[in-house]
Amino acid sequence: MKSLINRLLMAIDYPERAAEDALSFVLQIDGYEIVAEETGARLVLTYRLTGDGALLPKLASYAPGRMAREGAVLSADGDGAFLWQAASSNATPHDLIRLFETFADSCDWWRERVADNPDGSYEHEEGIRV
């Protein structure tokens, strides 16, 4: 049986395959990396948005509206902000294609927000640059 990661790679017609026992694989998409990880009974896609926490308050202000529209979740850890989205292990090829497409679209939208603040600062509602 094909690994969940390889099922994703085949479904999206990615040119490479992962080793059958691989629990993670890095996809190169439009100049950035999406990591696919098999954890238990699900496939999790992640994308690192920032390498520090400077933009977290601004990004967090977008999160409720975006999460209502899409499946990607904004999260934070000690290394900054990242997006993630998951699918169950019984996802069909169509489900995997849809997961990947919607996640890649989310990454593009969030990457634009980060690019709007290249120095990590943002303007507070009162017009104060933070």
Image (spheres, rainbow, N blue to C red):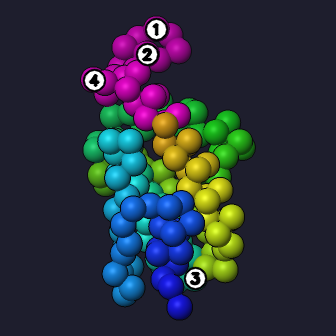
Q: Secondary structure at mark 4?
A: loop
Q: Nearer the viewer, residue 119 or 42?
A: 42
Tell me whether the residue at label 2 lies in contact with that at label 4, contact meaning CB atoms closer than 8 angstroms: no
Residue at the disc numbered 4: 119
Residue 113 disc label: none
> Which secondary structure class fits the magenta region best?
loop
Of the residues tagged 3 and 2, which is closer to the observer? 3
Identify the magenta region.
109-130
Instruction: Identify the residue position indicated by label 1 in the image.
Output: 127
Q: What is the spatial separation of the Cα atoms under label 3 and label 1, in whole angstroms?
A: 46 Å
Q: Secondary structure at mark 3?
A: loop
Nearer to us of marks 4 and 3 is 3
| Real-space CA distance between mark 1 and mark 4, rounded to the nearest whole angstrom | 17 Å
For marks 3 and 2 on the same chain, the one whose residue lies earlier in the sequence? 3
Give the residue pinned by disc 2: 123
* Residue position marked by numbered label 3 in the rendering: 41
Q: State yes or no: discs 2 and 1 in contact (Cβ < 8 Å).
A: yes
